[in-house]
Image (tube, rainbow, N blue to C red):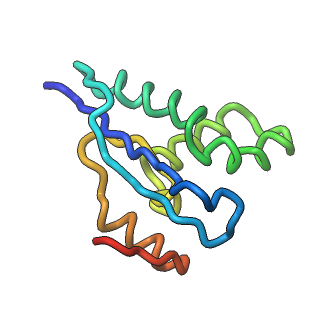
Amino acid sequence: MSFTIYRIDIVEVEGNHFSLGRDESWTVREDRTFDNEQDAKNYILDRSKIFTDCVLLVQPLIARGASNEEKQKFYNGFCFDDDTYIKYRRFFIGKPPIEDIKAALKNDGVKIRRQ
C-alpha cells in the first residue's frame, strides 16, 4: 500500500502584500508518495515544522519550556488529530478535506470567492 502526500500551496495575489484584506490563490498538488504510513507522517511532521503556521503556534510551548512529549502532542494535533488546526495544515495523507477547510475559514470570517 502506498501513501500519497498532498500539499496545499498558497500564492498571494500581486500588489497587495501589505493589506489586511489580501487575496490568496490555493492549489492542491501531489507532493510525495511513501510505502508506509509512518514515513508519510514523519514527512508531514518535518515539513509542517518548516512550511506552515505550526512554527508560530508552537512558540508559546517552547517559551514556557514544554517537554518534548508536550511539543510532540501539539505537533500530532496540528498535523493530524485536532481539527482546530485544519485551516493551518498544508500537508495531508490523501486528498485534503477542502470543504472542511473552507468551513473553518468561513467560521473565521474569511470570504471564499470561488468554490
In the displayed structure, does residue 102 sit left or right of residue 52?
A: left
What percent of the width, then of the height, locates residue 62?
79, 39
In the displayed structure, does residue 91 sit left or right of residue 30?
A: right
Residue at horizontal 48%, vertical 59%?
24
Q: Quadrant of residue 108?
A: bottom right
Most extreme residue toward the right, as rendered? 64
| Depicted 23 relative to depicted 5: above or below | below
In the displayed structure, does residue 70 sit left or right of residue 112?
A: right
Most extreme residue toward the front, as rendered? 15
What percent of the width, then of the height, locates residue 38?
35, 25
Residue at horizontal 29%, vertical 28%?
37
| Depicted 65 relative to depicted 14: above or below | above
What percent of the width, then of the height, locates residue 11?
48, 49
In the displayed structure, does residue 100 sit left or right of residue 57?
A: left
Where the N terminus falls, by quadrant?
Answer: top left
Residue at horizontal 60%, vertical 32%?
50
Where the C terminus falls, by quadrant?
Answer: bottom left
What percent of the width, then of the height, locates residue 94?
24, 42
Residue at horizontal 53%, vertical 37%?
48
The one of 27 and 1 positioned closer to us in this rendering = 27
How many labels sit on residues?
0
